[in-house]
Amino acid sequence: MHDPHFNILNVMTPFPHSVDLGASLLEARQFMKEHKIRHLPITKDGELCGIVTDHDIKIMLGPEFGSPDPDELSVLDVYVDDPYVVDIATHLASIVSTFVERKIGSAIVTKHGKLVGILTTRDVCRVLAEYLHERDNPGGGEAA
């Protein structure tokens, strides 16, 4: 059975948001705050080369966001250079299995090698919750 809920296009967050590898860590963090995102693809000369997460930034900057000096850090200091990248045609079950096996929380989604979105565990949980709610409440009403 093919359920449209679980088509990667319906689950991923589409965007062309990314920052250059040479960006400062504070720039990346501010960009993430402005766009309300927790995972940010990194590019070099327009090509995808990694990812940085809010978690990576928080670990690097420490609890006070001041050690080491954030003005001296760049994305290069914290990004992951081997992110999980999937083609938009990849089956969602395969991606979720990889999340569990590799203990990761996101996949960068590409089409013909170009960035088209990101899929996170939050996206998967959101669509699963919607699916379960609809399955348990087929008329749309609240359970008694």
Image (tube, grey):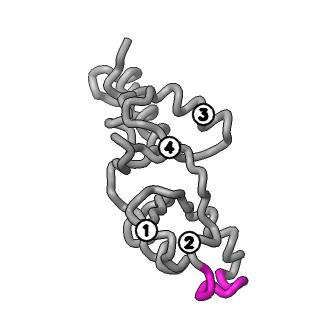
Q: Is residue 125 shown above or below 131?
A: below
Q: Name the residue under label 1.
A: 19
Tell me the chief SS of the magenta region: loop
Mark closest to the chain's N terminus, 4 or 1: 1
Disc number placed over residue 76 in the picture, else none: none
Q: Is residue 15 left or right of residue 125?
A: left
| Mark 3 or mark 2: whose residue is earlier in sequence | 2
Badge 1 density bin: few <14, some 14–19, many ≥20, Cα 10 Å: many
Q: How far apart, in angstroms, are the residues tagged by discs 3 and 4?
A: 11 Å
Task: Examine the rendering and report whether any part of residue 115 can be seen.
Answer: yes
> Mark 3 sits on what residue?
98
Asked if residue 41 is positioned above or below residue 28 in the image, the reply reads above
Disc 2 residue type?
Val
Residue ID for mark 4: 85
Task: State if disc 1 and disc 2 touch (CB < 8 Å).
Answer: yes
Q: How crowded is mark 3: few (under 14 residues within 10 Å), some or many (20 or more)?
A: some
Q: Which of the two residues, 69 or 144, is positioned nearer the viewer here?
A: 69
The amino acid on which the numbered mark 3 sits, given as a three-letter code, is Thr
Determine which quarter of the picture holds residue 73: bottom right
Q: What element carries label 1?
A: strand
Q: Give the x, y percent position of residue 68.
A: 71, 83
Measured in 3D between alpha carbons, the distance from the residue under mark 2 to the one under mark 1, in whole angstroms, is 9 Å
Q: Which residues, given as a range, are shown in magenta?
A: 65-73
Characterize the local packing of mark 4: few (<14), some (14-19) or many (20 or more) Cα atoms within 10 angstroms. Answer: some
Q: Where is residue 33 in the image (x, y as percent from the top left)?
A: 44, 71
The residue closer to the viewer here, 6 or 143, is 6
**Hey, which residue is sitting farthest top in the picture?**
1
| Residue 116 shown in magenta | no
Of residue 63 and residue 74, the one placed in the foreground of this image is 74
Q: Earlier in the sequence, mark 3 or mark 4?
A: 4
Residue 92 on image: x %, y %: 46, 29
Tag 2 residue: 75
